[in-house]
Amino acid sequence: PKTLGRINILYVFFFTWFGCSSLHLLDLAREEREREEREMRLITHNMLSCNIKGVTNGFPLKIESVKVIEKEVDFNPDFLRHMFAKIEWKALVEGARSMGYAELPEDSPDASVLESVDETFLRKLHHALLELHLEEGALVCPETGRKFPVNKGIPNMLLHEDEV
């Protein structure tokens, strides 16, 4: 049988006990997995830019958030240390603030903070990069003002014919 992803044993017990079919349970697991995969995180935002023809300043996209959700993700400090050098800090801070999270420092911290025994900074970075999800809103090109809608966590970055 296929794995059930994040649906835990209590859900399995509940649905089995109250007579829900296993097909219904698998459908719920599939829907949960698909929802997790489509949520737009700030780690993704930090890599997106506006690709409209002629645009020279398409990064970072501004975030207009309508609905932001927080979803717990396993903490992995090694992953964060590896990703830190690849992150455009100012874009991350602006994105996090536009989604209602103001716990990151304005200026990029020194790399030594990544090796600190105190994981406070890494946990804040983890929360901003991986646990904040833009569910509804828009990403806005800083040069043209063109809005790319985000619906159900999926950014629609398709260009119109005249923008290619």
Image (tube, helix red, strand yellow):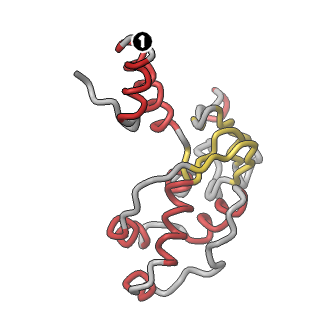
Q: Which residue is drawn at 68% across and 36% down?
A: 149
Work out which quarter of the rendered image holds the C terminus and state it.
top right
- Residue 143: image x %, image y %? 73, 53
- State the image quarter where residue 33 is shown: top left
Residue 151 lies, with reference to residue 71, above or below; the image says: above
The one nearer the camera, 134 or 164, is 134
Quadrant of the image containing the N terminus: top left
Left or right? Give the position of 6 relative to 63. left
Q: In the image as oriented, which residue stretches furthest toward the left? A: 1
The residue at the point 56 percent across, 80 percent down is 108
Q: Percent x, y for residue 61?
A: 65, 53
Measuring from the top left, give residue 45's x and y in whole percent. 56, 52
Camera sees residue 56: no
Q: Which of 49 and 31 is in front in this view?
A: 31
**Of the residues shown, which amino acid type is indicated by label 1?**
Gly
| Quarter of the view holding residue 96 | bottom right
As drawn, is 49 to the left or to the right of 6? Answer: right
Is 149 located above or below residue 80 in the figure? above
Nearest the viewer among 7 and 162 is 7
Element on which disc 1 rests: loop
Mark 1 = which residue? 19
Instruction: Tell me, yes or no, if residue 42 can be seen here.
Output: yes
Above or below: residue 150 compared with residue 134: above
| Left or right of 54, for residue 85 | left
Relative to 80, is 107 on the left or the right? right
